[in-house]
Image (cartoon, grey):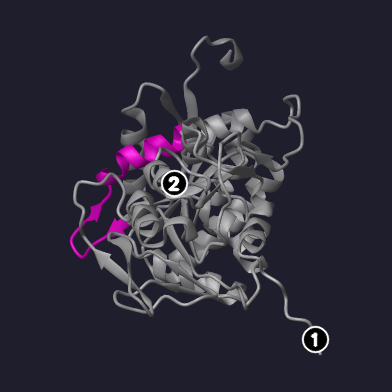
């Protein structure tokens, strides 16, 4: 019996209309001894019909499929057989937009499949795919509604000795797994006259950041755009770092500019939240605000530490509201967070820190 195994493998169902993709994904997933492919399905309908018998812990789901597409299949899975779903998406504008709709509808995460004229280069995804399946399975265990519920989330002031903190003039935000949905939840609540800019490093593959920024811009009162090298940073604008290049700032006497560069090299993540935040800490010192949110790993820990060391304000998302409590956990363990708050309270923390006051109507 599955529940009686001392070290049960994570059971994975692969749903894709391409026989090549089903074979490629099966080989990649099966290469890890902790994972087991319990079945494959060529259509969304077939996956739904086999769900009860296979009982997978995690599902990989193609975005574009005939008859019942990925989004329609996901909606049915979430309603009838709720469990973590990882979307497998091509890097096209249409697929990227569908992927973001899927994340908003409850998908846990996504991995891109890169299409080229000659071949489908898929095997570079192996490490990323395996890591996300494992985190998704762990997330299901942690958030299992049958477990004893945790206490409600609340803001927590961390026990860090601090002097008076300045009102920030620049916000640096680092986020990864679970980030697209989290950002879609909080950024639309910010006012159009937000008195500070926000720089965002959201770990994404190439081809996704531009449509993601465009999507957020349609949802938000603030302006959201993919950052462009050399542009002037303005209050009330959220700048999304482009995939594959680092974002830093260059502060002058009258204005601050976006800088995009492939330096420093040999970073695990490009763009890196650490690189962006360290730049903001150096340029703005105590006027910097760092926010670390849901995501795997520890990117952002050194950057948040730099902001904290310079006297800036540091905020971490709490465990209960994180899809993956990795990046904030690292920062909390280092003792560099001034406050830990649930996702929904992060916009309030920004407005409170910047002393935002909505203009009264005369």
Q: Secondary structure at mark 1?
A: loop
Tell me if I can see residue 167 in this picture.
Answer: yes
Q: In the displayed structure, does residue 51 sit left or right of residue 169?
A: right
Q: Residues within 10 Å of mark 1 (few under 14, many from 20)?
A: few
Task: List the residue tagged with mark 1.
Answer: 361
Q: Secondary structure at mark 2?
A: helix
* First of labels 2, 1 by sequence position: 2
Residue span colored magenta: 114-134
Whether residues under marks 2 and 1 lie with C-beta atoms below 8 angstroms apart, the answer is no
The verdict on residue 115 being magenta is: yes
**Percent position of residue 288, x then y:** 47, 58
Front residue of this view, candidates 49 and 279: 279
Q: Residues within 10 Å of mark 2 (few under 14, many from 20)?
A: many
Q: Residue furthest right?
A: 362
> What's the residue at 49%, 39% (across, down)?
336
**Quarter location, residue 144:** top right
The verdict on residue 302 being magenta is: no
Task: List the residue tagged with mark 2.
Answer: 304
What is the quadrant of the C terminus in the image?
Answer: bottom right
Q: Residue furthest bottom?
A: 362
């Amino acid at each position: 019996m599955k529940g009686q195994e001392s070290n049960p493998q994570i059971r994975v169902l692969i749903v894709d209309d391409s026989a090549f993709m089903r074979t490629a994904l099966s080989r990649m997933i099966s290469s890890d001894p902790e994972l087991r492919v319990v079945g494959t399905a060529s259509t969304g309908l077939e996956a739904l019909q086999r769900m009860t018998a296979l009982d997978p812990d995690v599902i990989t789901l193609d975005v574009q499929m005939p008859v019942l597409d990925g989004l329609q299949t996901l909606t049915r899975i979430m309603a009838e057989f709720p469990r973590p779903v990882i979307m497998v998406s091509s890097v096209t504008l249409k697929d990227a937009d569908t992927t973001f709709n899927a994340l908003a509808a409850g998908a846990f995460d996504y991995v891109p499949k890169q299409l080229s004229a000659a071949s489908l280069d898929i095997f570079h995804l192996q490490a990323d795919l395996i890591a996300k399946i494992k985190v998704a399975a762990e997330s299901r265990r942690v958030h299992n509604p049958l477990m004893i519920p945790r206490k409600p989330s609340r803001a927590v002031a961390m026990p860090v000795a601090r002097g008076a903190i300045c009102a920030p003039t620049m916000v640096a935000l680092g986020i990864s797994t679970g980030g697209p949905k989290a950002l879609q939840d909080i950024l639309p609540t910010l006012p159009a006259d937000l008195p500070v800019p926000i720089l965002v490093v959201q770990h994404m593959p190439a081809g996704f950041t531009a449509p993601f920024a465009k999507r957020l811009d349609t949802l938000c009162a603030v302006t959201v755009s993919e950052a462009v090298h050399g542009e002037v940073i303005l209050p009330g604008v959220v700048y999304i770092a482009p995939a594959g290049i680092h974002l830093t700032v260059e502060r002058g006497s009258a204005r601050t500019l976006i800088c995009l560069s492939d330096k420093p090299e040999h970073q695990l993540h490009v763009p890196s939240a650490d690189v962006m935040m360290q730049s903001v800490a150096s340029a703005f010192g105590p006027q910097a605000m760092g926010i670390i949110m849901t995501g795997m790993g520890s990117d952002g820990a050194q950057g948040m530490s730099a902001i904290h060391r310079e006297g800036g304000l540091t905020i971490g998302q709490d465990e209960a509201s994180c899809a993956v409590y990795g990046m904030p956990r690292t920062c909390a363990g280092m003792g560099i967070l001034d406050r830990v708050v649930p996702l929904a309270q992060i916009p309030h923390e920004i407005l409170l820190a910047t002393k935002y006051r909505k203009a009264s109507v005369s």
